[in-house]
């Protein structure tokens, strides 16, 4: 049941992200005369501090947040997995060099490292994707290497080597299909961590940059409305809606990841 709930919610998020220009009643950066307009009428959830429609920006934020996080996670998966399998195939110099580099990167908190790098190179979506993709690839490297070490000594890999197959063939056709389950699970978890990282950076003002809509930025921009909740309850709820959008997305991904872990780890067979 939880998996179905997670999948339905994720489908709604993806649908909103893909068709945002057709679903949103107003433009992402369209400005109206009244700032902090109340709920209802032309603006379902009111307007923000400069008169932009909050409901429309929440829909567009799904495209921006999910898109950037997905690209960064895929980049981390590709880099970390390929290098991890290469390290497992060559347990000498390549393994030692890559492992020491990964240990060094993992010793520094991702949030602090990303903050420093964005301060140096500038807060842009491209820099955000590249920095998080490289830093988070260390987690995929550790997992893919540890799992691939047990696979590279098996007969099917030795046979592929004796046949003279290329390294790319051995990685993508022989080893990768047999270690995909833990990588898929890690992909879901890493996607959540990247959402948290980008949301934290956006809340601090160095993540997704305006005029692009972002849920965490919307929380910061409308946080002042919380103190007016005693006069207008809808005003107090306004900054909580984008925060709830982040939480609901992460919980839904967790539901799906837990279900996938359940059906691939043998727990389902043990219960039977």
Image: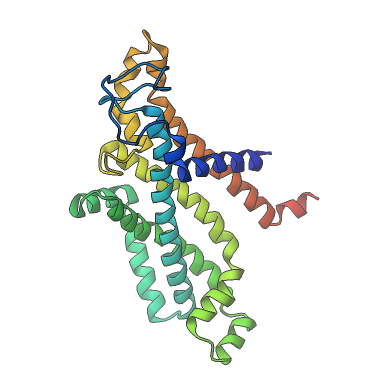
User: Which residue sits furthest right?
Assistant: 272
Q: Residue at x 54, y 80 (%)?
A: 170
Q: Is residue 29 above or below residue 74?
A: above
Q: Is residue 109 above or below residue 172?
A: above
Task: Identify the image's colour scheme: rainbow, by chain, secondary structure or one colour.
Answer: rainbow
Q: Residue at x 28, y 29 (%)?
A: 31
Q: Residue at x 24, y 48 (%)?
A: 123
Q: Residue at x 38, y 44 (%)?
A: 64
Count of marks overlaid on the render: 0
Left or right relative to 201: residue 166: right
Which picture quadrant has residue 216? top left
The residue lying toward the viewer, choosing from 202 and 151, is 202
Which picture quadrant has residue 206? top left
Quadrant occupied by the N terminus: top right
The residue lying toward the viewer, choosing from 256 and 153, is 256
Percent across and percent down for residue 74 are 45, 59
Q: Is residue 244 above or below residue 1?
A: above
The residue lying toward the viewer, choosing from 41 and 267, is 41
Which picture quadrant has residue 79? bottom left
Left or right relative to 10: residue 101: left
Percent across and percent down for residue 220 are 30, 30
Left or right relative to 155: residue 186: left
Percent across and percent down for residue 116 are 23, 51
């Amino acid at each position: 049941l939880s998996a179905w709930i997670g999948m339905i919610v994720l489908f709604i998020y993806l649908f909103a992200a893909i068709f945002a220009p057709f679903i949103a009643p107003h433009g992402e950066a369209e400005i109206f005369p009244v700032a902090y307009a109340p709920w209802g009428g032309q603006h379902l959830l009111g307007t923000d501090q400069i008169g932009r429609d909050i409901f429309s920006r929440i829909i567009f934020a799904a495209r921006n947040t999910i898109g950037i996080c997905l690209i960064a996670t895929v980049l981390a998966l590709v880099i970390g997995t390929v290098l991890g399998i290469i390290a497992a195939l060559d347990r000498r110099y390549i393994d030692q060099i890559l492992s020491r580099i990964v240990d060094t990167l993992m010793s520094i908190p991702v949030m602090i490292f990303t903050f420093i790098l964005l301060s140096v190179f500038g807060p842009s979506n491209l820099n955000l994707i590249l920095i998080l993709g490289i830093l988070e690839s260390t987690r995929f490297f550790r997992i893919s290497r540890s799992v691939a070490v047990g696979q590279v000594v098996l007969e099917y890999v030795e046979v592929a080597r004796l046949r003279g197959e290329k390294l790319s063939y051995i990685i993508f056709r022989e080893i990768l299909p047999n270690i995909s389950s833990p990588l898929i699970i890690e992909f879901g978890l890493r996607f959540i961590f990247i959402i948290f990282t980008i949301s934290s950076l956006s809340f601090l003002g160095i993540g997704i940059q305006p005029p692009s809509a972002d849920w965490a930025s919307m929380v910061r921009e409308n946080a002042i409305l919380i103190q007016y909740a005693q006069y207008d309850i809808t005003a107090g709820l306004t900054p909580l809606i984008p925060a709830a959008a982040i939480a609901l997305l992460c919980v839904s991904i967790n539901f799906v990841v837990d279900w996938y872990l359940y059906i691939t780890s043998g727990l389902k067979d043990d219960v039977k």
